[in-house]
Amino acid sequence: MEAELKGLLSDLHSLKDSLRERSHKDLIDKIQSRVEHLSAAEKLANAHRSKIKDMSAEVVDSNPYSRLMALQRMGIVDNYERIRDFSIAIVGIGGVGSVAAEMLTRCGIGRLLLYDYDKVELANMNRLFFRPEQAGMTKTDAAVQTLTDINPDVVLESYTLNITTVQGFEIFMSSLKNKSFRPDKEGSGVDLILSCVDNYEARMVVNQACNELNQTWMESGVSENAVSGHIQLLVPGETACFACAPPLVVASGVDERTLKREGVCAASLPTTMGVVAGLLVQNTLKYLLKFGSVTPYLGYNALKDYFPTMEMKPNPQCSNAACMERQKEYILAKPARDAAAAKAKMEAEESVEPECLHDDNEWNISVVDDDNDAQGSKASSGAVTEGLVHELPSADAFQQPPVTEETTTTTTGDDLEELRKQLEALNAD
């Protein structure tokens, strides 16, 4: 294509030279301008970076990982390059899921599994990530196209299917069990599932799959009025599953689908969805790379900038059979897990060496014994070594006049004479 565009430009240039009329030359100039624009767009479309085998902390303009590896140099993360070992499944590539996928791709996640059945529409352009020219494409295909351009190091797997159908659920479960990316990994083939769907039915399907696989996952959502949202960590058996505490509308027996009205859609703000996606990915990174505190539940109220947090324990009467099974396993394993944690904490405390206060002493601070300190106090008090005298008096000492025997005698006689005169004056009265 690039060679053909260059040939076309050359032909137009030759044609322009052969023309005499000014109007014809102006038309050729317009055509040349359009061809040059197409040529530039073609070069931009083919500008893909090559894959990078190892992450480097070298601070150069050509290193896409230097800012990420700085987290390791600053002591926030022990080993940032471990992020390439992790697999994340994102269910729902909408306003939250697509932005979360982009953030994880830019962070250098090892493998992303993308699930959605919908197509990109122009009505989605009020959100982030998708572009107008992708309208009509499936969301998964459009996501793979964009994410591959951003970071070709990430292994991307897309599944265009509806997980709420029987066949879709079987494919969903099979893909989660696939361990080709990390054969040595225990449990399922993914480290974490991020649920970014917008309906209760799909959330319950993800909940069922995670309970059956004993798979940790995070749930997220944005309200219909677009000014609030939340993220939640769900650990089977340890925390409440999605069926343990269902939404009030579901617990009351109302069919969620009957609440939707024809021609009426929920509000959508890219700001709220961007905030929720950022909180979700931040919690994901803390969970995977083990830094900071992983939040069990975090809400977001955009009207008041309010972020409520809470913890939810599993319901011992949960309606989900797989959840009840996970709860039993967690209770049985808890004593051994607590004992191991206590032992590890004790060993860590014993292995901590006392801190050396003056290991690198640039101020020449030293510790002296009491004898040296006493000598120093003596010297500072004004005493001098035997055989030496002060040439000048101390400025702080009050100078008393020298007292002689003659002075003392004269002063005493004068005082007695004055006293005698005072007594005579009293007798005369």
Image (cartoon, helix red, strand yellow):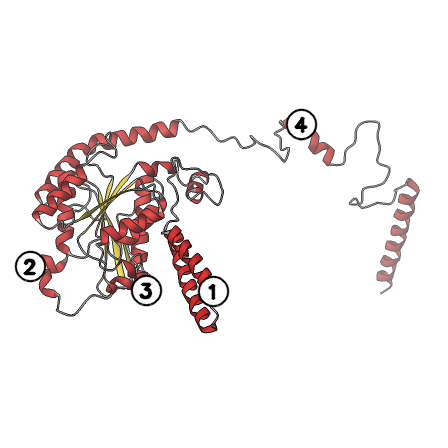
Earlier residue among tags 4 and 2: 2
Q: CA distance from mark 2 to mark 3?
A: 32 Å
Q: CA distance from mark 4 to mark 1?
A: 103 Å
Q: Which mark is residue 304?
A: 3
Viewer-nearest residue: 28 or 404: 28
Residue 349 appears at what percent x and percent y?
38, 30
In front of the other: label 4 or label 3? Answer: 3
Label 1 sits on residue: 18
Label 2 sits on residue: 253
Residue 116 appears at what percent x and percent y?
19, 51
The secondary structure type at the circle numbered 3 is: loop
Q: CA distance from mark 1 to mark 3?
A: 70 Å
Considering the image in quadrants, where does the C terminus appear?
bottom right
Earlier residue among tags 4 and 3: 3
Rendering quarter of residue 222: bottom left
Label 4 sits on residue: 372
Rendering quarter of residue 137: bottom left
Relative placement, left or right, of 419 versus 378 is: right
Q: Residues within 10 Å of mark 1 (few under 14, many from 20)?
A: few
Q: CA distance from mark 4 to mark 3?
A: 65 Å
Residue 403 vertical position relative to residue 201 in the rendered view, above or below: above
Q: CA distance from mark 4 to mark 2?
A: 86 Å
Q: Label 4 sits on what residue type?
A: Asn
Q: Label 1 sits on what residue type?
A: Ser
Tell me, yes or no, whether the two marked residues, 2 and 3, touch with CB atoms within 8 Å: no
Residue visible at 60% across and 33% down in the picture: 361
